[in-house]
Amino acid sequence: MNQLQAMRVFTRVVDLSSFSLAGKQLGMSAAAVTRSVGMLEAHLNMRLLNRSTRSLSLTEAGRLYLDGCRAVIDKLDEVESELVRATRDPSGVLRIAAPSVFASGALTTLLSAYRDVNPRVDFDVTAYDTHIDMIEGGFDVCFATDRQQVNASLVSRKITSVKEIVVATPAYLSRRGVPRAPTDLAQHDLLAVSDAPRSWEFADTDGVQRVSTNGPLTASGYATVRAAVLADMGVALLPLPLVADDIARGVLLPVLNAFDVNGGMQHVSIVYSGRNYLTMKVRSFIDFAVEQFRSQHGHAAGNLHAPPLALRAVA
C-alpha cells in the first residue's frame, strides 16, 4: 500500500463526502477509492469512516487521523514547493574550496559577479595550500590546480591557468648575485611550499634542468613563503597573481624569465560531483564560472597572469 497516496485519498473523500466525487477528482474509480480507504483502515486496524448508502461521517479515530493527514500532506507539499522553487531560483549556501592564491584573487571577482545575478546565494569558502579531501569536506564545488589530486569519481573541467615565477628582493640579489641560469640556484637560498614538488624544473631550447629545493625554509602556505622572500631570506617560486603587485612596486624582481618553470602554466580546474542531480545553485554556478572564464580568455583576469610586458625582469 502507498500509505501517503491513501492518506491523500482519505482526506479528499472527507472533503467531498463522496467516494465517487473523490475518484473523479483524483482520476480513480469509485471502487479504487473505496479499496484505498479500506486498506488504510486495515493498516491502522481501526475504522475511520462510518458509511451508509446516503452519507459518510468520521469516526472519533477518523477525526484524529484526518488532522494528522492534513499536517503531513501540507508539510510534504511545502517541502516539494520549496524544492521546485530552489531548482528554478538558486538560493542557499554554496560551499567552495579553492587554492589560496585563487581564492584571494580571481575567485572573489567571480563570486561578486555571480551574486549580482543570484543575490539569494551565499558562499562558504575554504582556502587551502596543501592537500584537501574534496569529497570528505562536503564541498559543493572545488577549484584545483594540476598539483592537487582529484578523485576519479569527480568531474573536472579546466577553466583557466596560472603562471609561476621565480622572484627575490633587490636587496637579496644585490647581496648574493643574480642567477643567470638554473644551475646558479645551487648557490642560493631557496624557499618553497612544503606540498610542492621537491625540485623546480626549468626548460628552454636546450632541454630541462632540475634544481633541488632543499633550502632554509619550507612552509605549508604561499603567504608565508612570500613573506620570507620579502624579508630578504632567499629566492622563491610563487604564483604570479600573489606577487604581481610586489613586482609592479619593485619590491620583488623576477629572475630566470627566459625559462619555462615546472612545465609552464599550471591549469586551474573546477571540480564537482557527477553531472546528475546537481542542485540549481551548484549547476548555475558551474555554468556561470565556465562562461566567465571563457569570455575572459586571453585577458589577465581570466588567465590569472599579467602580460609579459608588465614585468621588469632582471637580466
Image (spheres, helix red, strand yellow):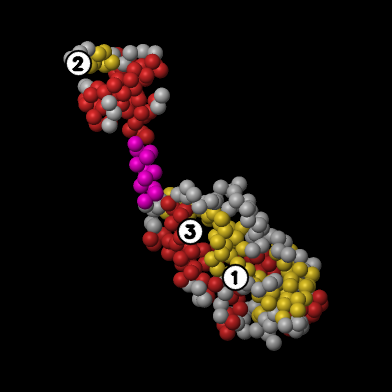
Q: Is residue 67 left or right of residue 91?
A: left
Q: Earlier in the sequence, mark 1 or mark 3?
A: 1
Q: Residues within 10 Å of mark 2 (few under 14, many from 20)?
A: few
- 146 sits to left or right of 284: right
Which disc, if any, is residue 286?
Answer: 3
Q: What type is the residue that disc 1 sits on?
A: Val
**At x 46% / y 71%, what residue is drawn?**
295
Name the spot of residue 138 as percent of width and height, x first. Answer: 56, 47
Q: Earlier in the sequence, mark 1 or mark 2?
A: 2
Q: Is residue 81 magenta?
A: yes
Residue under the point 46% across and 55% down = 283
Magenta residues span: 77-88
Q: From mark 2 to mark 3, how far is it between C-alphas?
A: 58 Å
Label 1 or label 3, whichever lies nearer to me, is 3
> As drawn, is 16 to the left or to the right of 104?
left
Q: Quadrant of residue 3?
A: top left
As drawn, 49 above or below 276: above
Q: Badge 1 is on which residue? A: 162
Q: Quadrant of the N terminus?
A: top left
Which label sits in the foreground, 2 or 3? Answer: 2
Which quadrant: the C terminus?
A: bottom right
Considering the whole magenta stretch, tell me its main secondary structure: helix
Q: For numbered disc 3, what is the local secondary structure?
A: helix
Residue found farthest to the bottom: 315
Tell me which amino acid carries mark 2. Ser
Residue 196 higher or lower than 248, as above or below: above
Alpha carbon of mark 1 to alpha carbon of mark 3: how far? 19 Å
User: In percent of the image, x 59 and y 49: which residue is there?
Assistant: 135
| Residue highlighted by disc 2 | 55
Real-space Cα distance between discs 1 and 2? 77 Å
Give how far across and how far down residue 57 sits, in percent.
Answer: 23, 16
At x 44%, y 53%, the residue is 281
